Image (cartoon, grey):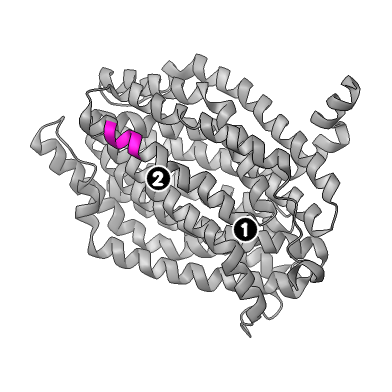
Amino acid sequence: MQAARWKRLFGDRKFYSMVLAVALPIMAQNGVTNFVSMLDNIMVGQLGTEPMSGVAIANQLLFVFNLCIFGATSGAGIFGAQFYGSGDTDGLRSTFQFKLLLCAGLTVLAIGILMAFPEPLIRLYLHEGGSAADIEATLQYGLDYVRVMLWGLFPFMIVQVYSSTLRETGQTVVPMVASIAAILVNLTFNYFLIFGRMGFPRLEVRGAAIATVLSRFVELAVIAGWTHAHAARNRFVHGVYRKIHIPGRLAKQIFAKGMPLMYNEILWAAGTAILNQCYSMRGLEAVAATNISSTIFNVFNVVYMALGVAVGIVVGQKLGAGEMEEARETDTRMIVFAVLSCLALGTLLFATAPLFPAIYNTTDEVRALATNLMRVSASFMPMYAFLHTCYYTLRSGGKTVITFFFDSGFIWVCSMPLAFCLARFTSVPLVTMYALCQGIELIKCVIGFILVKKGVWIHNLVSRKESA
């Protein structure tokens, strides 16, 4: 009996080789991306607390847009993975086209909002805790950054459409290569343009934004160029722009199953932005500290982020192929693997947390706050891994209404009201507030365990029998 339980929780070498073949390129891509984002952050951080805080606030607003695009591609993507698993190229092409049209509309909307209301949005994060001059300087840095970053929203959107579709077909290496090429451009031009090296002008935060926009055009050229150059391998691109054809039945299915996922990402991103706005009530030091903490933590969270995506791909393909019991067994083992991996990573981050803030050109108070915030995040890392893989498990079978309540519903009903009350009606310190708002997600762990164990997600979305 013990041996059977062990077999259910842990796979053999072949199993982990299969999982890592999917997850490692995603880990590498996200890891390199987040590592370079950390270097970006450190470079901007050398300019001082106000430039760093202004860029952090601007990126918080852009983060909402990024997750809207991620949600839109993911909503159709649950069908893309299953269409690929069932060998339906036409269905995969239609999901690609659906993503492209929807994401283009969202991008136009985002540009309109950010062009019309940049100052009021940034001011939401600026509160007492520093001089009026510091606050106005932070505002101006944020505005300078956002105005340049708007040029990069369209290439970012198109890259996500291509990358997500390639990943759904199990091709995770090409998006990684495109991302690494973009990262090298971003890092190089950050150095040139932020500090005015190699004959380039010193543009500071505007230089950081220009480097990011350039990198996004490079990433688009690499990933779109490769995909169309290898059309025999990527058959879904045949005629993809010649004739836009999305069957009405598929569009209805995507809206029914996929749109809750997009709404979830939008509301989750908005909820996260509001959480950070609540943390910012503790002053500019809180803005700077949360920026440093989240930037460093993102370098460490690549394991559970990649394994979550891998769950969606591997389990989704097995569901599409009708291998229901194997899908359940694979899912259990991947969740266990993610939690144990993040237990080790969380321990490492907790031990090394004081080293990272010391790199930044900021105050001792900000460094101490950032260290403690990182240690809180490190303590909860196994919980994050469990929740992330549960989310992708539910999503793989099209249970997007459940994931909506599980993810964004929870943050709006529980986490956000708690942060709002703590920020405005108490004098609880930032670190305590952050720990309470993270710790409440333990309730989600119980809900996620029950839903995954019951198997409510085991569902084939693309078989004729089930879609009829």
Q: Which residue is mark 2?
A: 412
Q: Judge the density around disc 2: few (<14), some (14-19), many (≥20) Cα neighbours within 10 Å.
A: some
Is the residue 16 above or below the residue 377 in the image?
below
Residue reaching furthest to the bottom: 243
Cα–Cα gap, marks 2 and 1: 27 Å
Q: Are marks 2 and 1 in contact (CB under 8 Å)?
A: no
Q: Position of 313 compared to 278: left or right? A: right
Which region of the structure is painted magenta? 417-421
**Is residue 373 at least partly visible in the picture?**
yes
Res 301 → quadrant? top right
For marks 2 and 1, the one nearer the N-term is 1
Front one among 300 and 46? 300
Residue reaching furthest to the left: 132
Magenta part, dominant SS: helix
Res 214 → quadrant? bottom left
Q: Position of residue 212 (x, y in %)?
A: 42, 52
Image point 50% across, 35% down: which residue?
A: 298
Q: Position of residue 263 (x, y in %)?
A: 48, 58
Q: Position of residue 3 (x, y in %)?
A: 90, 22
Question: Quick one: SS at disc 1?
Answer: helix
The answer to whether residue 418 is magenta is yes
Q: Which residue is mark 1?
A: 164
